[in-house]
Amino acid sequence: MELGAGVGALILYTPAGLDGEEIEISRDGSAVYPGLPAGRYTIWRGHAPAAAVTVAGGQVSSCHWPG
């Protein structure tokens, strides 16, 4: 895992019912990115925002799937 001043990582905890499901994530104000540059992201449930999270450079961020 590469972490640095402008690159972080995200651990997303989800319920068992989402096992095997595709989960979309996008940086606020833009399209889906394959990497996670530091910044604020929206986590999507279908076509609706499910949560927001900030990924900090040089850190691993986490978010629990909304109930």
Image (cartoon, rainbow, N blue to C red):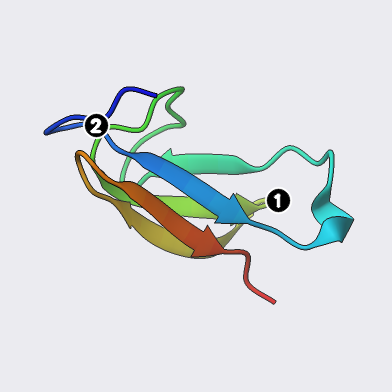
Label 2 environment density (alpha carbons within 10 Å; few <14, some 14–19, many ≥20): some
Nearest the viewer among 57 and 25 is 57
Residue drawn 65% across and 51% down?
A: 47
With respect to residue 42, does 6 lie above or below?
above
Q: From the top left corner, tell me how far across and down residue 29 is, in percent.
A: 31, 45
To which quarter of the image does residue 17 belong?
bottom right
Residue drawn 81% across and 52% down?
A: 18
To which quarter of the image does residue 21 belong?
top right
Would you name the residue on which mark 1 appears?
A: 46
Label 1 to label 2: alpha-carbon separation: 26 Å
Q: Going by the picture, which residue comes out furthest to the right? A: 17
Dot 1 or dot 2, earlier in sequence: 2
With respect to residue 39, does 13 lie above or below?
below
With respect to residue 43, does 21 lie above or below?
above
Residue drawn 73% across and 37% down?
A: 22
Name the amino acid, label 2: Val
Would you name the residue on which mark 2 appears?
A: 7
Q: From the top left corner, tell me how far across and down residue 5 is, in percent.
A: 11, 33
> Tag 1's secondary structure?
loop
> Label 2 near label 1: C-beta < 8 Å?
no
Q: Going by the picture, which residue comes out furthest to the front? A: 1
Nearest the viewer among 29 and 12 is 12
Position of the C terminus, as image quadrant, is: bottom right
Name the amino acid, label 1: Gly
Q: Residue 6 carries which label?
A: none
Label 1 environment density (alpha carbons within 10 Å; few <14, some 14–19, many ≥20): few
- In the picture, measured across the screen, residue 11 lies left or right of residue 27, that is right
> Tag 2's secondary structure?
loop
To which quarter of the image does residue 35 belong?
top left
Instruction: Tell how many labels.
Output: 2
Q: From the top left corner, tell me how far across and down residue 15 is, in percent.
A: 77, 63
